[in-house]
Image: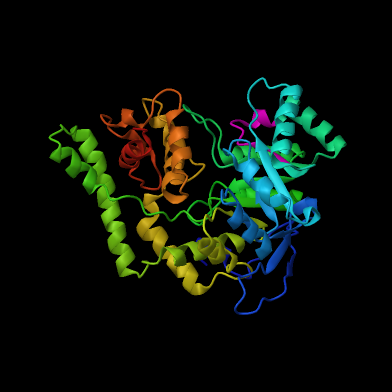
Amino acid sequence: MGVLGAGLAGSRAFAGSDNSSQAAPQASPDAPPKIKEYRTLGRTGFQVSDISCGFIMDEGVIRAAYESGMNYFDTAEEYPGHHRVLAKVIKYMDRKKVFITTKLEATKGETKAGFLKRARKALEELQAEYVDCLMMHCPEKAATLKDEGFHAAMAELKAEGRVRHVGVSQHGTFWFRDPEETMEKILLAAADDGRFDVFLMAYNFLKRDNAERVLEACGKKRIGVALMKTAPIAIYYNLKSRIEALEKDKKEVDPLYADGLKRYKEKYDAAQEFIQAHDLKNPEQIRDAAIRFVLGHPGVHTACCQTQTYDALNGVVRLSGTKLTVADNAKLEAYREGCGSLYCRHACGVCEPSCPQGVPVNTILRYQHYFAAQRREKEAMGFYANIPGVRADACRDCGAPCEAACPYGVPVQGMLLVAHDTLSMP
């Protein structure tokens, strides 16, 4: 069995897994698709839909997700306006049958009173008496997991019945220089800590090595697992037009800048040829296979999807209860071989210590992913504008040591230059 084959249906030999499931009733052929499988969300005991609802700003789409049988809804203090959008739908829900999570960043030096104030504001915005899980949002270090103010606040909120479980989310740190600790290190420390019942983490068919040990630890300790970043298949912009535009405007193109874009374009063109040769032209097929892949892991309980339209929502709901086929697996293998170098792995950061300028590579390319793949354009541009210190414009006259350090062959410099042009506010 190949690397991706571990996600095939039937591969359930995973130590300590309690990922039991139950089937949902079948809908009529003409009805909108319904969730078909529910799984036990670790030690919470909640029966969670295998496909769940991530950051969606359209209240109609969120309500349709609920009506499809989705019962896990994720939000965060950091998602602009999302608490209030979700609140409009919560009032229609059978509250006992849904699992609502929100997240707070653990900022350095925050007091118990500060966390309580922010948590209560989140509850007020959600118009909810309680949340099923309040997560520490993307802690930068394992030491942050021990934050006394955070845990004291969680204990008080639990005693009040305002919070039922505590969790942690991680898709890579927000370090802007020297990313010392990986997602794996932080989440393994969270598993050992024992106070976190649910993890929200990045995992997909192209990025497995930083998550497999975490999934194993979650199975042994009965921690609930929700996933994000499950389908890393956005095909990035063709960069030829950028060079042509610069030349047309008679602007001088730094040779290092041109070389970085050239390396990226060569990878892009090769990927396009591969896509044609291996009949990978339908991105929805690759996405579907990618989601089936992660759901085939016995340690995974639900995959959060950010579908912004009704058609996209129906597309992912149809995946509920389905299994990865041999044909699906072949497409993923082919995509990984031909296009894998166009994906900057979430929660990686291996290349960042090699950067002489301290550019936060993984963070910037995550913001580019928000812009290009998740249609969060304004938010992504705002995040980019608020990066402290150097940004990707520093890459224009650099020899690209990041590319030499990348173990996946990603044309990092060219991707960063495009990200800068895409995310910079006019």
Relative placement, left or right, of 319 versus 371 is right
Q: Is residue 108 shown in magenta?
A: no
Question: In the rendered structure, which segment of residues is drawn in magenta?
Answer: 134-145
**Is the residue 316 above or below the residue 238 in the image?**
below
Residue 130, quarter of the rendered image:
top right
> With 63 as the anchor, is 399 left or right in this view?
left
- Taking depth in this image into account, of 81 and 117 the one nearest to the observer is 81
Q: Position of residue 27 (x, y in %)?
A: 67, 76
- Name which quarter of the figure residue 281 lies in: bottom left
Q: Looking at this rendering, what residue extends furthest in the right direction?
A: 159
Q: Residue at x 69, y 54 (%)?
A: 72
Whether 106 is drawn above or below 209: the answer is above
Instruction: Give the x, y percent position of residue 8.
Output: 57, 68
The percent coordinates of residue 284 (x first, y second) are 45, 65
Nearest the eye: 403 or 199: 199
Q: Nearer the viewer, residue 311 or 132?
A: 311
x 15%, y 36%: residue: 249
Q: Does residue 201 appear in this view? A: yes
- Compared across the picture, whether 379 is left or right of 357 comes to right
Q: Is residue 138 above or below residue 42?
A: above
Q: Residue at x 46, y 67 (%)?
A: 285
Relative image position of residue 372 (x, y in whole percent): 41, 48
Residue 216 in view: no
